[in-house]
Amino acid sequence: MPARASSTTKLLSGSSWHTPNMANHKKTHPAYRWPWPKVRARILERDLHQCQIQMAGCTQIATTVDHIVPVTQGGAWWDDANLRAACRHCNNQRIERKPTEAWKTAATHIVLVIGPPAAGKSTWVEMNARAGDLIVDYDRLAASMGGTPHTHGDQLHTVINAARNGILQTLRKGQAGCARAFIISANPDAENIFPHHQVQVIDPGQEQVKARAHAAGRPATFQRLIDDWYRARANAGTDEQQSRSW
């Protein structure tokens, strides 16, 4: 059996999760150094210093330049056709609304660990994670917030889910700052919901999973949830293949 990974991982509490400041990123990113000032000045002059985005709240006067197709989605840094003058308000709104697909080219390798409830997903991650890996696990978050494992209650669920979604959004923006992250999910459609570079399916078999849930004293609803997971995967015609070892 592989050695158990260190329990030292990035803290999952939303209140202490730091996201890099975009303005500071622009100050240090090589692409914003020379010749960016000259390109910026040329685009502003071309567009007569008039904002070309014109969103609600637009100030009309352009002082910044916006990439029409974000660089994270393949847009060109320097092509004038991909640049337009923008007021600061509209540019900031665009930054917030751009599709969060920066994770695709970010340094963090995302492993999506999926399987039915009680399949052993968290155990697999604990055995394979290293110190410094980010683990996005609903049950871990619940425990850190005072919840009882697997029985969190509707009110607590809202808080836990908000914290989890905040972490997932940070991952989608490519701002996690770690080399590797694990997302654990029992959603049968997880591959279409969560960002990932690699999928690890944990599936010991339906009857074995149900037996494990019963032996672990999981709530009776788990039996139905397990059946629902297998039914949904079968209906989707998913060709499940475990990914390669890390």
Image (cartoon, grey):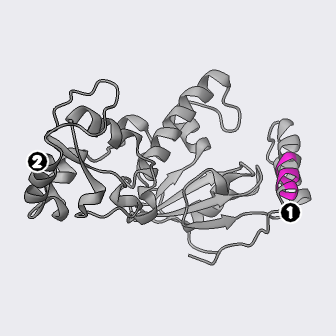
Q: Looking at the image, is mark 1 or mark 2 nearer the viewer?
A: 2
Place of residue 133 in the rendered image (x, y in percent of width and height, measured from the top left) = 45, 60
Name the residue located 65 percent from the left edge and 33 percent from the top edge.
148
Quickly name the residue at label 1.
Answer: 205
Prevailing SS of the magenta stretch? helix
Work out which quarter of the rendered image holds the C terminus and state it: bottom right
Place of residue 217 in the rendered image (x, y in percent of width and height, measured from the top left) = 81, 42
Q: What is the three-letter code of the residue carrying label 1?
A: Gly
Name the residue located 60 percent from the left edge and 60 percent from the top edge.
112
Q: Is residue 54 above or below residue 195?
A: above
Please indicate whether residue 107 sits to the left or right of residue 4 in the image: left
Quickly name the residue at label 2.
Answer: 45
Q: Is residue 45 magenta?
A: no
Residue range corresponding to the magenta coloring: 228-235
In this view, the residue in front, 14 or 45, is 45
Mark earlier in primary sequence (1, 2): 2
